[in-house]
Image (cartoon, helix red, strand yellow):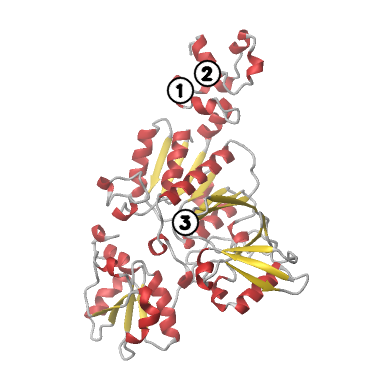
Amino acid sequence: MRLIYSKVRIYTFGVPRENLTDPKSLMVQPPSHRVFTDSELRRYARHLALPEVGPQGQQRLKAARVLVVGMGGLGCPAAQYLAAAGVGRLTLVDDDLVELSNLQRQPLYTEDDVGRPKAEVAATRLRALNSAIRIEPLVELVSAANVLELTQQHDLVLDGTDSLEARYLLADGCYLTGVPLIHAALRRFEGQVVLFPSGGPCYRCLFPRPPPLEVIEDCAMAGVLGAVPGLLGSLQALEALKWLLLIEPREPRLLLLDGLAGTIQPVALAQRHSCPLCGESPTITAPVDGQVSCQPGELAPEELQAELEGPAPPLLVDLREPWERNLGQIPGKELHLPFSQFAQRQDELPREQELLLYCHIGIRSAMVLRKLQQSGFRARHLTGGIAAWLRETGQQERLY
Amino acid sequence: MRLTVKLFAQLRERLGTKALELELPPGATAALLLEQLVAEHPTLAPFRESLLLARGSEMLEPQNALANNDVVALYPPFSGG
């Protein structure tokens, strides 16, 4: 590399200015400064100018391997900032395809991407942003079978998934393989970002076990304003970069965002003695699928057609709101009872016929199922809702 | 002793309030607070093993003792992404 003065000046950012009075001292550079090309020095100039980063920090980012699970509202901004920052190896995991309803909060994708795998589209976009780093897309679901292998190949994991099932699985996998985890999750205008170092405290110190399925909601049901995951994903990237750069504070902590009040409240975390994963007598020693308990009375989408064409087809009960019905319905004899009016209109349901409840993704129907079963109705619900049925029957373009 | 319990997310919607007052015996722990809260408001029962309790910027463990006038915040896990 040619050492001309104008270039050497860049190398000296990060060194206290008072030490730079002798221009000859600029010629003495530690070897780590030479690992960057001129183009990298220009690209990361604003990092190199930060005393907390500098060439050593930039080298740490270049050497880091980060796993981002879930390329949705959180994973998109988080991965964008990690790629832009020069994290050397990024693995992006998501088994979903881009849907039109994603664009409201996932501006990494465009209308032309609808129907394409998120992980692959994201990898293409991020390679265009930074061609000097390695990005591997994985169009896969994280499960008990692959979670340990995935986490242990990385230095840090970011959780941007959209289900409690995946969150518990990933948190267990990270703890069991000793890989730190930056968790982020949201509900409406509120969010949580948590740094879990290896060795605990872990996610189960905060929330020991998942609540039952009928009280769990997701963005599809609760709703979300797009800027909220944008803010949380960026906060997740900030926590990740600080961790990789050894910037304090590095203590385990939870950041609680209230998007309406405009506040972020930090909470210091403690290891829970009774934690089922990292406590004194752990009961969880391996990752397990299906931790969010299922109800009896479930019908899988692949069994629906046979049921509807059978000798005694159940009465379909669509629990979705009127606007959702405009986007598609399951054909068959049916009754429309919006979830929002369920309490007032429950009496309209017939007791003499078997009911098959469905909604968008199977959460509202699971909640109603439990109530109806307690009231003596003969009812089942469609797991995964109309979304699973649309996928099963090759109608992905109608997903919302 | 008297404490204030602040509720967040679905807990707030389930009870229809952002905060409530709770009367507990002196020296009560975080575990007892949760037990009494669920007894008074059974709609919170499904969340019993899934709640984070915090006092200010400090996470509470079940065995931690509470004091008069404490303000304890309860958070459920969020799933959305």
How far from the left and from the top, in percent, is residue A264? 56, 50
Circle 3 sits in a helix, a strand or a loop, which is it?
loop
Can residue A24 be seen at all in this image of the molecule?
yes
In front: A175, or A73?
A: A73
Amino acid at pointer 2 = Ile
Can residue A153 be seen at all in this image of the molecule?
no
Could you tell me which residue is drawn at 61 percent across and 13 percent down? A28
Label 1 marks a residue whose chain is A
Cα gap from disc 2 to disc 3, whole angstroms: 42 Å
Q: Are marks 2 and 1 on the same chain?
A: yes
Q: Are marks 3 and 1 on the same chain?
A: yes
How many numbered marks appear? 3
The residue carrying mark 3 is: A189
In front: A380, or B25?
A: B25
How far from the left and from the top, in percent, is residue B37? 63, 74
**Figure quadrant of the C terminus of chain A:** bottom left
Estimate how packed mark 1 is, as few (under 14), some (14 to 19) or many (20 or more) residues with alpha carbons within 10 Å.
Answer: some
The residue carrying mark 1 is: A42
> Marks 2 and 1: CB-CB under 8 Å?
yes
Could you tell me which residue is drawn at 34 percent across and 53 percent down? A102
The residue carrying mark 2 is: A10
A124 sits to left or right of A280: left
Circle 1 sits in a helix, a strand or a loop, which is it?
helix
Could you tell me which residue is drawn at 33 percent across and 44 percent down? A121
> Marks 3 and 1: CB-CB under 8 Å?
no
Which mark's residue is nearer the viewer, 2 or 3? 3
Determine whether B17 is above or below A308 in the image.
Answer: above
